[in-house]
Amino acid sequence: MTVKLILRGKEYEVRAGMTLLDALKKINVLSEAVLAVREGEMILDDEILKDGETIRLVAVISGGAQ
């Protein structure tokens, strides 16, 4: 029972049944640094991940002068 997380072309597998936030912690990714997308829909940190899902993690980039 696994879930696949994809960030910048790299794949990670985590256990199904955990929250997105717990999965991100497990792969050492800050939740503030990515947007999680499942089947074209953004999901939140408290979402429970289900077996066989693929979640795409999109890096959030910020910066520039204010």
Image: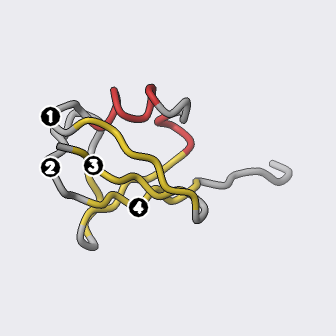
Q: Which mark is residue 64?
A: none
User: In the rendered image, which quarter contains the N terminus?
Assistant: top left
**Mark pair 1, 2: CA separation:** 7 Å
Q: Judge left or right: residue 9 versus residue 26.
A: right
> Are there few (<14), some (14-19), or many (20+) residues within 10 Å of tag 2?
some
The x and y percentages for residue 11 are 49, 55
- Mark 2 vs 4: CB contact within 8 A: no
The x and y percentages for residue 52 are 18, 57
> Are there few (<14), some (14-19), or many (20+) residues within 10 Å of tag 4?
many
**Mark pair 2, 4: CA separation:** 15 Å
Q: Amino acid at mark 4?
A: Arg
Which residue carries the number 4 mark?
56
- Mark 3 vs 2: CB contact within 8 A: yes
At horizontal 46% and vertical 58% (from top left) the residue drawn is: 6
Which residue carries the number 3 mark?
3
Which residue carries the number 2 mark?
51
* Element at label 3: strand
Q: Judge left or right: residue 54 versus residue 60.
A: left
**Mark pair 4, 1: CA separation:** 17 Å
Q: Which mark is residue 17?
A: 1
Is residue 48 or residue 34 the one in the foreground? 48
| First along the sequence among labels 4 and 1 | 1
Q: Amino acid at mark 1?
A: Gly
At horizontal 22% and vertical 58% (from top left) the residue drawn is: 53
Q: Amino acid at mark 3?
A: Val
| First along the sequence among labels 1 and 3 | 3
